Amino acid sequence: MSDVPSPRWGLVVIDLQRDLCHDERRAELVAEALPHIVKLVDAFVDHELPVFYTRFELEPDDPQFDRFGDRYCIKGTPGAELIDEIQPLRGEVIAKTKHSAFFATDLDERLQAAGCTGVVLTGLQTQICILTTAADAHHRGFEVVAASDCVVSTRDEVRLEALEWIEKYVGAVRTSTEVVASL
Amino acid sequence: MNRSGAIGLAAGDGLGDSSTMLTEILAPVLRLPTKLEDGHRLDIDAGPIVVTTDVFSVDPIVFPGGDIGRLAACGAVNDLAASGARLSSCTLGIYASAELERAVLERCLRSFADVVIAEGGQVVAGDTKVHPDRRPELLLFVTALGRPCTLSSLDLDETRAGDDVYVTGPLGDHSIAVLSAREGLGFESVVQSDASPLSEPVLALAEAGLLHSARDLTRGGLVAALWDLYSAAGLACEIRRADLPIGERTQAAADMLGLDVLALTNEGCMLITAPREHRARVLKVLHDHTATAQAALVGQIADGPSLGPTLTVDGAGEVVIPLPRGLGVPRLC
């Protein structure tokens, strides 16, 4: 985490949705990350810091399905629901249609309204939604931390590449334990 | 016109709504000739005419730094400028979704017309077709005629050994701006398309006899142009990586996506070659124009034989630049 003055952090839990988390390609990895994510959520709530949960709400004909060769998180379907393991929710839910959690959402405004000057990012996938949200947050003037044991990619080498990119260009990478210790 | 604000399918059927489209949007926005007949007669001075044609497709059609109308007009203007000519007249074909908002169509057409008219040109003919699906939202088909400003056509085979090699502006911004706006990559607020007409600086250099060749760095970017030059002239560019103008954020986005900035599309950037003795004058002309203010001398044309264009990276030596079969898939999935 950064030196003095310490930012006021907001926790962003990205796309922990059934379609994405129960996918057999990453279900085991999500299960490994979940205890760390829950620990962070609890710590943020204990410190009276805000928690935001994002979720994809996509139209059935969203063009990204063609580009990625996959279909997921269609608005109104059970697969778009946030997973049971993070219920009950401890913060606000933000619907999004693109990778960055800031794209055409009011996350920026909500963070500012909560007095946040930094974001801690968790969820999936590291090389898509975590990465682009980190970039967007940085460009909007927020301090950025990715919690390394709280982010998931289908392939771990891709997760590590993405974390390297975040450290190189837009923020810091810390374990959940380090994040909690710095709150 | 459709009451919801979309142009509607009937806008392309040749009847009443088509007439409304023509009289309320196309004619005033594009400043079409007052007489609308099946054909338009051009008065062309004797001598050569340069012609170029292109189909423009981009998603989204409005992106940071421009829209498909500006993209299409700049594409035509720059293709002509790279051939030593200035746009005089053009045709515009429109293929639009019935669901396209009228206001968005007007915006794009106004962008197109603004560039064409600023060049002293005119839209002289066109056609509109409307299809019932959501995509593509809008395609533009442009054929443009240009008056040569120089005897030289600035073809790549006019490049000479020992020439300086310049890039007229930052590389890769257009691709990153469009990709970011389409996918939500977090760069759309900080990287803008470079779509700009380059006729003023490029033709100023050409008219002064300072240039040997020029190539618009659109699809395939710098890499494709370097290989085109190698094929056309049998000469290799020796490029210095450290001298290439690349924005820090564009480089970061390209690294994020696993893409090579040198292969990304540009819409307001050219590769030009010029004799070394003109270096000071070339740089002054480029830096005096807004659209080329960040132009850079990036290398030289090799004097001897080579296996292809080369890139010298500080600390890593010189390598032949590979010509990929395609840009590749952005590293997202």
Image (spheres, rainbow, N blue to C red):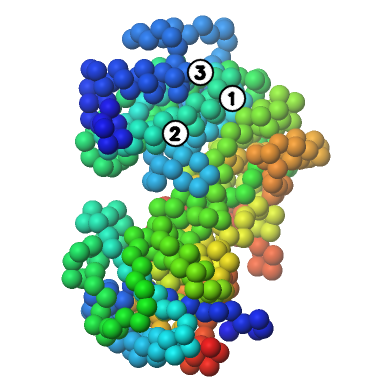
From the image, state whether disc 1 or disc 2 is nearer to you.
2
Q: Residue at x 53, y 88 (%)?
A: A183
Sequence-first disc among 2 and 3: 2
Give the percent coordinates (x, y) of residue B113. Answer: 49, 26
Q: In terms of secondary structure, where does tag 2 sit?
A: helix
The chain to which mark 2 is attached is: B
Q: Amino acid at mark 3?
A: Gln
Instruction: Using the rendered image of the protein, determine whether residue B273 is visible from the camera's viewpoint.
Output: yes
Give the percent coordinates (x, y) of residue B14. Answer: 24, 18
Residue A130 picture quarter: bottom left
Residue position marked by numbered label 1 in the rendering: B118
Q: Are marks 2 and 3 in contact (CB under 8 Å)?
A: no
Q: Amino acid at mark 1?
A: Ala
From the image, state whether disc 2 or disc 3 is nearer to you.
2
Residue B107 tag number: 2
Residue position marked by numbered label 3 in the rendering: B122
**Distance of mark 1 from mark 2, alpha carbons?**
16 Å
